Amino acid sequence: RFHGEGYQEGYAEGSQAGMAEGRRYGALHGARIGSEIGCYLGFALTWHCLLQKGTDEKNSKKIRALDSLIGMVQKFPYEDPTYDKLQEDLEKIRGKFKQVCSMLNIQSDFGIGAERSSLTF
């Protein structure tokens, strides 16, 4: 009897603690992804504005790549936590960002953590 009661109490307490820890982890991870995606969008919009002033062929290719990155970010499902291709789409956006940086001759280094939280050029 005591074993059963102890198990039930422990299970209930563990479930509650696990739920709270899961919420904290989800909020933190979601904030990191949101920060990363927001950084990509700000980067792309800024460079898009800067490159529109020139009209040569090289700039048009860069602008098309930036438009693609902007479109990918805008289609990213921020509101749907159950989206099953979230990691896949995030990797595609990261790849497109790296491609755009390569076209612009910019070294990209996006890192989020306790020691660093910035995009450096």
Image (tube, rainbow, N blue to C red):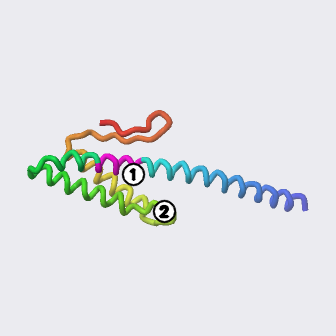
Which residue is at the front of the view, 31 or 115?
A: 31
Element on which disc 2 rests? loop
Q: Is residue 88 left or right of residue 49?
A: right
**Residue type pointed to by label 1:** Ile
Is most of the magenta stretch helix, strand or loop?
A: helix
The residue indicated by pointer 2 is 79
Left or right for 114, reference 55: right
* Residue 51 versus residue 89 in the image, above or below: above
Residue 66 at x, y percent in the picture: 24, 53
The residue range painted magenta reads 36-45
Percent position of residue 115, x then y: 47, 33
Say the numbered circle drawn on residue 17.
none
Indicate the quadrant containing the C terminus: top left, top right, bottom left or bottom right: top left
Residue, disc 1: 37
Q: Could you tell me which residue is drawn at 20 percent across and 53 percent down?
A: 63
Residue projecting furthest to the left: 56
Q: For the N terminus, which image quadrant?
A: bottom right
Helix or strand or loop: what does disc 1 sit on? helix
* Magenta stretch contains residue 90: no
Residue at 82% across, 57% down: 9
Task: From this view, report whether residue 51 is shown above or below residue 5.
Answer: above
- Quarter of the image where one finds residue 90: bottom left
The residue at the point 42 percent across, 64 percent down is 85
**Counting other residues with Cα less than 10 Å from the Cα at mark 2, is it few (<14), some (14-19), or many (20 or more)?**
few
Can you say whether 109 is above or below 37 in the image?
above
Mark 1 vs mark 2: which is more N-terminal?
Answer: 1
Q: Tell me the amino acid under the disc marked 2.
A: Glu
Could you say where residue 30 lies in the image, as x and y percent from the top left?
Answer: 50, 53
Residue 113 place in picture, x, y as percent: 47, 39
User: Farthest right residue?
Assistant: 1
How many marks the image carries: the answer is: 2
